[in-house]
Image (cartoon, rainbow, N blue to C red):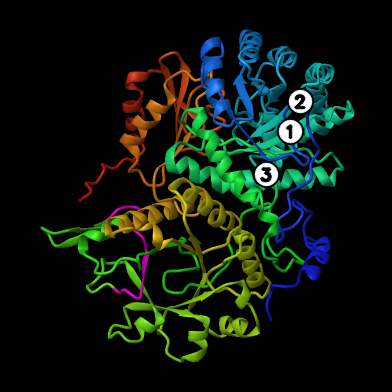
Amino acid sequence: MSLIVDYSSFYMAIATEISSFKKYCDSLTAYSRRQTREVNIGDVPLGGNNPIRVQSMTTIDTMDTQGSVEQSIRMIEAGCEYVRITAPSIKEAQNLDNIKKELRARGYHTPLVADIHFTPNAAELAARIVEKVRINPGNYADKKRFEVIEYSDATYLAELDRIRERFLPLVSICKEYGTAMRIGTNHGSLSDRILSRYGDTPLGMVESALEFIRICEDLNYYDLVISMKASNTQVMVQAYRLLVQKLEEEHLQPYPLHLGVTEAGDGEDGRIKSAVGIGTLLEDGLGDTVRVSLTEEPECEVPVGYNLVNRYADRAGHAPIMPLEVIPQDPYSYTRRQTHEVGNIGGDNVPRVITDVSRVSHWEYKDFKSVGHFYLPEPDKWTMNDQGCDYIYTGKRPVAFMLPNGLKEIRDFSIWRAQDDQRNKYPLFLLDEWQASTERHAELNFLKVSLEDWDSSLISILRERTDVVLLLDTDNTHAMPEQRRFFFALVEHQLTTPVIILRKYDNLDEERLQLFSATDVGGLLIDGFGDGVLLTTDASLQKNRAEALQHIARNNTISFGILQASRVRMSKTEYISCPSCGRTLFDLQETTAMIRKRTDHLKGIKIGIMGCIVNGPGEMADADYGYVGSGKGKITLYRGQHVVKKSVPSEKAVDALINLIREDGRWNDPQKTFD
């Protein structure tokens, strides 16, 4: 019996799909974008039936009118639909008027958004000038001193009254001027008051925003956009989902959502991390505007945003997937699906990386550097880096010599059964091969399946065999939800078979491969599904051996990047670096590159690199170490949330950071790599 059903049954069942939890999206199997209020932001409305909008933020000092105008124009010409500009004080808020007038005089009418932290008076001024203001409920009327405060119900309500009085003027001004507002919660800047009552949790993030939303609705002000940003992708996804559920539960308006991962970083890591967070929510139809926060020029963020959202322009036409009657997994917290161990896969093992090398024949020792394993000719031994894959899939082209210690080979069943060494290699079966043959490996067999294969015979195989690992495939354009449906079926039937997520991509450039694979695989990992990943790409793109090896190396690196961004396997240093803005007190891109160059061999360590105190101790909430601008040419160093050194000259700050890591016994000298 197949889980793929006809369209009539498919749509009739949607109404009962999510019965074990409150709904956070219209469907977990049929793509349908969440219906939200339309919010007018200048001449570019958001939400409702409008396209998913893409925006970015300037990095120039807001007091530099001409620089801000020129950078805004570059962003707009790159496709930016809203331009956000920081206004940390009254003087920057005032200068927004000059920036806006110059842009309009030059023929650019893109709506402007003022970004406000700490200063309600700046917000009140900006709301009279620009089309939208963004406030952070964690620091608009609250303070953060990392203090635990005990509140009675009465004193807590008194604090809410105080916030209401501080917030009322801004709401009144926005109503008068037709200005929209984003209530933007950041995981790292929750107030001491929220932390004391709700903890450092997605619920705390949601409640921080709801307090302000309730005030707005009491005042009949509904031009709101909401965000739940975090650097931790798991926390971010859970918070957005919980927000939608709480809005519905309290019968509040279905406000449009602004999606973003804070401090994602730069390059490949920043794109993968952004896609894991943003893409997971887009897959469920959540999100009305996105901002990809990269430590790069803002105009570079815009095409990345479009690459993410354009996937959903025609997604509604995907092949149908059987709806759910019960969700067997809590979508608001992370729990890894329980599996039994087969070899070194499943159980308590970290998710494994299998790299497809089947398109290269006649492997040589030196080729293994593409998968993180290095042969040293002079001592005649192997070494590997932190991204040495766990398995290689050779298909019909087996490697003819002994592999590096710890690296294992998977061969197609037809090749495996014809080889002499069946013990040290592992077979990959198609389902019909499994059913037609009784030959098996004694310990570990890979079985390739898709949702269409789900029936009673497959269930019987998985109940009877404890030596099987599934390779889960899909050809559905709605790939992540289809594969998630298979995982739901396993949980429903209490089957603990480990599963490797297999994803195939054709004719994608490198950036779209990073984004799409991080969305599809990362979305499953965020939900606790998957015991490994196998990426494979179109052979037609590989013109020669050298190019094929480049593709293999790329896929291997992306696989490890997705596992790290999903917080399920840490294989390298993680950099939580904010995008530059007008508040930044040093050259963020240059400094990030310098710190990365000195520390990128420190496996599993998280370093926060923040341009100013606004994005400082809060936004790097779960970093091990922090490097935060505290004044012109001055850096404050953190160990976790605690200040260790203040006013360190910027030219000495990187060395001071490394010395701090040494003091904690977490430093090791970088190892040489070999060509």
User: Regarding mark 2 in the picture, which secondary structure is present there?
Assistant: strand
In this view, the residue in front, 591 or 47, is 47
Quadrant of the snapshot with the N terminus: bottom right
Q: Decide which of 80, 598 is in the foreground and name it.
A: 80
Mark 1 vs mark 3, CA separation in Å:
15 Å
Residue projecting furthest to the left? 378
Q: From this viewpoint, is residue 64 visible?
A: no
Residue 194 image position (x, y, % from top left): 70, 33
Mark number for residue 225? Answer: 1
Residue wearing tag 2: 180
Q: Residue at 47% of width from left, 18% of height from top?
A: 585
Closer to the camera, 265 or 232? Answer: 265
To which quarter of the image does residue 11 belong? Answer: bottom right
The quadrant where residue 635 appears: top left
The numbered mark, 3 or 2, whose residue comes first in the sequence reads 2
| Residue 161 to residue 63: above or below | below
**Which mark sits nearer the N-terminus, 1 or 3?**
1
Question: Please, what is the dominant secondary structure of the magenta stretch?
Answer: loop
Amino acid type for the residue under numbered disc 3? Ala
In the rendering, which numbered label is found on residue 303? none
Q: Amino acid at mark 1?
A: Val
The span from disc 3 to disc 2 (Cα, nearest Å) is 22 Å
Is mark 1 in CB contact (under 8 Å) with mark 2? yes
Spot occupied by residue 304 in the image (x, y as percentages of width and height) = 53, 40
Q: Does the magenta run of residues contain 396?
A: yes
Residue 428 lies in the magenta-colored region: no
Question: Relative to residue 647, is residue 282 depicted above or below?
Answer: below
Residue visible at 52% across and 82% down in the picture: 431
Residue matched to label 3: 239
The residue shown at (43%, 19%) is 586
Write the start and end of the magenta stretch as one range. 384-398
Q: Are marks 3 and 2 in contact (CB under 8 Å)?
A: no
